[in-house]
Amino acid sequence: MINDGKKQISIVKIIVFTGMVLLAVLNFSKIINMSWKIYNVLSPLILGAIMAFVLNILVDTYEKIYFPKSKNKAIVKSRRGVCIFLSILTIVLAVIFFLNIIIPQVAKFISLLIKGFPAVYDRVVKWAFEHVDDVPLLQQRLKELNMNGEEVLKRGLAIAGNWTFGTVSLIGSAFGTIFKIIVALTFSMYILADKENLKRKFDKLLRAYVKKEKIKKLYEVLRVADESFSSYIVGQCKEAVILGGLCTLGMVVLGFPYARVIGPVIGLTALIPMVGAYIGAALGFILIVTVDSFQAVLFLAFIVVLQQVEGNLIYPKVVGESIGLPGIWVFAAVIAGGGLMGIPGILFGVPVAATIYKLLSKRVNKKLS
């Protein structure tokens, strides 16, 4: 009788699940539209939760510094508020530094690149036409291309916009963006100020409705995700600053042109794991080749050496193996993330992939053993 009852429950579950899948397929467009509307409503809260996660890394750091062993009631009571304030102040100062130091250099870099690229492209195409007599197929392809440097630049910018900046147009007007950021920041402060209480209530809710074994698995997933994201955010920021500084210093010492322009760009692109620094190096090469072709080649050699130092000495020390994701999957995560979600996908595709990889590896090893 018990077995018959279990079979009936299983059959009912299968029927209900099948029905839900059929409804989802038949009303797919409506579900997508509704999901998008819900996302637009909740996006400030989602952004606030992301802000709270990032700020919490700083809050935890400051709480370890702000008289952690003190029993003074005033210090204990003010610790959380002071640490939240210091964390936000740190972010604000970093943004001000970014806007005042990095952005002007990047803007100057883009301006110089746009001015110099068409001439470089036309020079390369002319050289190719002069040296492809022995390769008729290549000569035919060059003729079919039939674009000058300016047309190639416009098309390249359009492709880059579709890959990396596709999500920017979804943000909306400037006023809406500012309002969303203010709401998100306020929500993140509430989360940080009351995070222990929120954790207790969340745990209580889970224990009331979810089995202990599933709660344990959920907390394991959250723990791995927290480790992956925290290590990635802190490590990539440190690595970008170090790499950008070393690149600028090395270029100044070796006498390369545009050192103070290219260095910050290399550091900024280094936020993209694996391919970021090479993207910056390619752009720097195009900029230097407009001045001196030989120095441009030397610049590439310098970047290769710098990348070897960074990959073998700096990255293992700064980021270490905490991400726990093989290089091939890092590359795949960057490409897939950028194609699916633009800039957010590029920045957060790696820690998401690292989380999935760690959990899947653990489960596979457990199954095999």
Image (cartoon, helix red, strand yellow):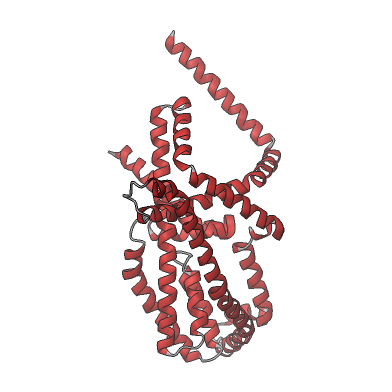
Q: Name the quadrant of the N terminus.
A: top left
Task: Look at 53% across and 70% down and name the residue there.
Answer: 98
In the orientation shown, which residue stands out farthest toward the left? 369
* Towards the viewer: 321 or 54: 54
* Image: 299 above or below 221: below
* Image: 315 above or below 221: below
Q: Position of residue 227 (x, y in %)?
A: 39, 50
Q: Quadrant of residue 174?
A: bottom right
Q: Position of residue 235 (x, y in %)?
A: 40, 61
> In this image, 304 relative to 84: left or right?
left
* Image: 153 above or below 56: below
Q: Position of residue 70 (x, y in %)?
A: 33, 49
* Towards the viewer: 272 or 249: 249
Q: Quadrant of residue 366?
A: top left
> In this image, 223 relative to 42: left or right?
left
* Towards the viewer: 331 or 236: 236
> In this image, 88 relative to 67: left or right?
right
* Towards the viewer: 337 or 36: 36
Q: Quadrant of residue 3?
A: top left
On the question of residue 340 being in view, the answer is: yes
Total labels drawn? 0
Q: Position of residue 231 (x, y in %)?
A: 39, 56
Task: Look at 60% across and 77% down and name the residue there.
Answer: 107
On the question of residue 333 being in view, the answer is: no
Q: Name the quadrant of the C terminus.
A: top left
> In this image, 104 relative to 324: left or right?
right
